[in-house]
Image (cartoon, rainbow, N blue to C red):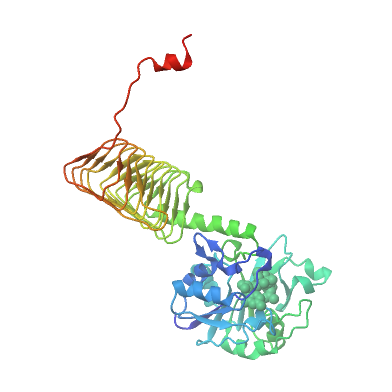
Amino acid sequence: MTSLSIVILAAGKGSRMKSDKAKVLHDISGKPMLYHIIKESQKLSNDITVVVAHQKERVIESMQHYFDNIAFVVQDADNFPGTGGALKNVRVKHEKLLVLNGDMPLITATSLQGFLENDADIIMSIFDLKDPSGYGRVVISDSGVERIVEDKDASEAEKKITHVNAGIYAFKKEILETYVPQIDNNNAQEEYYLTDIIALANRDQRSISPLLIDEEHFMGVNSKADLAQAESIMQQRIKEYWMRQGVIMQLPESIYIEEGVTFEGESLLENGVRLTGNSHIVTSHIKAHSVIEQSSIVNSSVGPLAHVRPQSKLNNTHIGNFVEVKKSTLNGVKAGHLSYLGDTIADEGTNIGAGVITCNYDGKKKYQTVIGKNVFIGSDSQLVAPVEIEDDVLIAAGTTVSCAKVNKGSLAIDRTPMKQVENFFYKFFGTK
Ligand code: UD1
Ligand code: MG
């Protein structure tokens, strides 16, 4: 673990993404691509450097939110553009260096083992592709890897080569120090290509070892179509992991679970469920098409078609269809149908009838609703916050609770007496 340094190239513009956001900050399963790469890199190295330039402040800020032991180096992309330019100011601690691309979010520590077990001066990665267009082609002769030629510089014959450079390399620190300064920009793009170190090292008869790698871990994300493809592979991994830990999923291909969501015990997720942020689900039943964002659900059932918004805690609770909960703690509560519970605390034995709404916002500020134990709230009631409803209260259907407190044991009822006007229908519509 201590003998390897890792450098992640994340300075490029990523123009093919057609986005205002830096490519490496696009999310896969709820976290930026670069986050996934750093997370896996940390399993292998304690010296990780990320090279930034394009939108450098945003990239650095975003990563510092997740990690506190990463070094950042700013590439002088105006004077030294390209992947070779990216390494110009990089200094590493250890004797061996692994270079990763910030646009390969599916890399895992295990999939990088091949680079660590080999002691050549340079280990470079190769894919074999039916359609190699866009990639650097690897020119291999009887004596081994000779050089890499970029798509834009390749001759017609070279363009036919199907061995392509995957863009990941491991090399000795001394190779970085010797050859990176020798890279020039005499090429079609007038960029400093890291790939040129292969020809330079080959000239000096350094050992270069090609490593065949698989696309499932090393695909590069260059467009939004690639992003969607990487997302679906990442989702498959996350869901397979949790199914192995005991979570039941009906039609898992329709379920979305972000990196950071955790489970305990045996939960059942029906089709179409979406779980985001650091949600924590313990022995619960999440019914079809429910969305849970950054919340904890313990021994509860949710949905179908329910929406639990951030910072909610449901314990031993049932919420049913079309119930929205936000920043609320429900402990032993039933809210079966069509409710909005925002900034609410509700306690054991409380039943929330259909259509109950907490009016938590007056257009300027948000206010709390506190509901005690064994409260029965009749259908279609509104609770105007801030309000406290003590234990053992009955609220009649259709009541607008507009006082600050309803006392323990009481009935709250707010109704204009209903009138019944005999024969009104016939007077109004006439008789047939
Ligand atoms: C690169 C390789 C190509 C390989 C392909 C595999 C070079 C010259 N070419 O091409 O042989 O087949 O990857 O995906 O290396 N970056 C910087 N600074 C820069 C430019 C890029 O940090 O000035 C970073 C990018 O953010 C990205 C990585 O380097 O993470 C690769 O850059 P990209 O522009 O995607 O290179 P490719 O054209 O794909
Ligand atoms: Mg690329």
Q: Indicate the quadrant of ligand 2 in the picture.
A: bottom right
x and y, in percent, of residue 259 in the image: 45, 61
218 left or right of 192 in image: left
In this picture, residue 126 sits left or right of residue 307:
right
Q: Quadrant of residue 170?
A: bottom right
Horizontal side of 62 relative to 136 (left or right) equals: left
Above or below, comparing residue 372 to residue 209 in the picture:
above
| Residue reaching furthest to the top | 432
Furthest-right residue in view? 156
The residue at the point 70 percent across, 79 percent down is 193
Q: Position of residue 352 (x, y in %)?
A: 30, 41
Quarter of the picture containing the N terminus is bottom left
Q: Quick one: which residue is furthest to the front in this view? A: 427
Picture layout, residue 175 above or below residue 326? below
Is residue 9 visible in the rendered image? The answer is no
Please give the count of numbered marks on the rendered protein.
0
Percent coordinates x, y for residue 325 in the rendering: 37, 49
Image side of residue 89 versus residue 288, left or right = right
Whether residue 58 is visible here, answered yes or no, is yes
In front of the other: 151 or 408:
408
User: x, y (%) of residue 76?
Assistant: 64, 84
Q: 204 and 339: which one is in front?
A: 339
Q: Nearer the viewer, residue 292 or 322?
A: 322
